[in-house]
Amino acid sequence: MSPEWISELKTAASRCSNRHSLALISQIPETYHDLSQGLTDLVHSFDFEKIVQLCVQSTSDID
């Protein structure tokens, strides 16, 4: 996913927004079903801090 998408997911998770997070996750291509499912599970268990950590890690891997 693009850096912009990751940033938007990080913002949504930082705000603990189920709806926005799930809307973004729904944009993940089906070929990445495991990623999509894992993030969805984190949203449903309200583990937004973990999503933020994954976004930060992902963007640091890009740099």
Image (cartoon, helix red, strand yellow):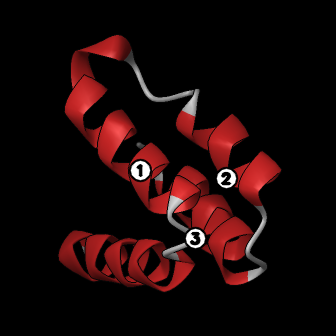
Name the residue at 73% across, 74% down: 16
Q: Is residue 56 left or right of residue 13?
A: left
Q: Which residue is mark 3?
A: 46
| Residue at image coords 31%, 47% | 38
Say which mark, if any, is on residue 21. 2
Which of 3 and 44 lies nearest the eye of the viewer?
44
Between disc 2 and disc 1, the foreground one is 1
Residue 14: x and y in percent read 68, 82
Q: Is residue 7 above or below residue 63?
A: above
Q: Secondary structure at mark 1?
A: helix
Relative image position of residue 5 (x, y in whole percent): 58, 51
N-terminal label among 2 and 1: 2
Q: What residue is disc 1 on?
A: 41
Left/right of residue 52 with respect to residue 38 in the rendered view: right
- The residues tagged by marks 3 and 2 sit, at their Cα atoms, a distance apart of 11 Å
Q: Quadrant of the C terminus?
A: bottom left
Label 3: which secondary element: loop
